[in-house]
Amino acid sequence: MEREAPNRDLTDLERRVANVVRFGVISAADYGRARVRVTAGRITTGWLPFVTARAHDHVTWCPPEVGEQVVVVAPTGDLAQGVVIGAVYQAAHAAPEDRPTIDRTVFADGSTVAYDREVHAYTLEVVEAGRIRLQVGPSSLEIDAAGIRLRAPRIDLN
């Protein structure tokens, strides 16, 4: 009996070490609870939280999507205690930029938001069916394929 315990302990240790960092694919999402399941080989995790840029007084929302390749970190090697820490570029979903001075987001519909700090330029491109809306209190600027609408209690043109 004593000989089996060290083997069992070694097997558990090997499993835990293998699970400290896992690459996998989001297989299910519960956005209401901000949780996802990840499939890595033959293993599918339970519901895990995912990292966001900010989660206190300033909160961001950019959840991983089903089919997205991610990294799961489980410091103790127990995947039930893991967290999804980020997405990984892959051949089917390559990086949208190759210069470090540009911060770019490309949305599924083709719209993009980019800031190039080298030339101090902010660019927002929306697909033809979309619109851009800026609003401060009762004042608003709306742009779409039909035109530009400016609404405000007072407009100064200088």
Image (cartoon, rainbow, N blue to C red):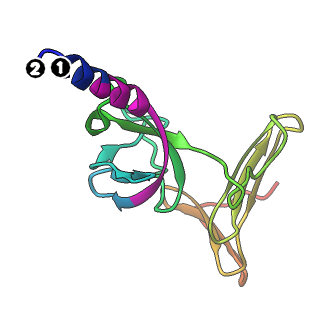
Query: At which x and y percent is residue 103?
Result: 73, 42
Query: At which x and y percent is residue 71?
Result: 50, 40
Element at badge 1? helix
> Residue beneath label 2, please?
1
- Asked which quadrant contains residue 10, the reply is top left
- The reply, left or right, for residue 39 in relation to residue 98 is left
> Residue beneath label 1, please?
5
Magenta segment: does it hold 20?
A: yes
Reply above or below: 40 against 154.
above
The residue at the far left in this view is 1
Looking at the rendering, in which quadrant would you find the C terminus? bottom right
Residue at horizontal 89 percent and vertical 38 percent from the top: 119
- The reply, left or right, for residue 43 in relation to residue 23 is left
Reply above or below: 52 against 41.
above
Query: At which x and y percent is residue 21?
Result: 46, 32
- Asked which quadrant contains residue 2, the reply is top left
Q: Give the residues in magenta.
A: 11-27
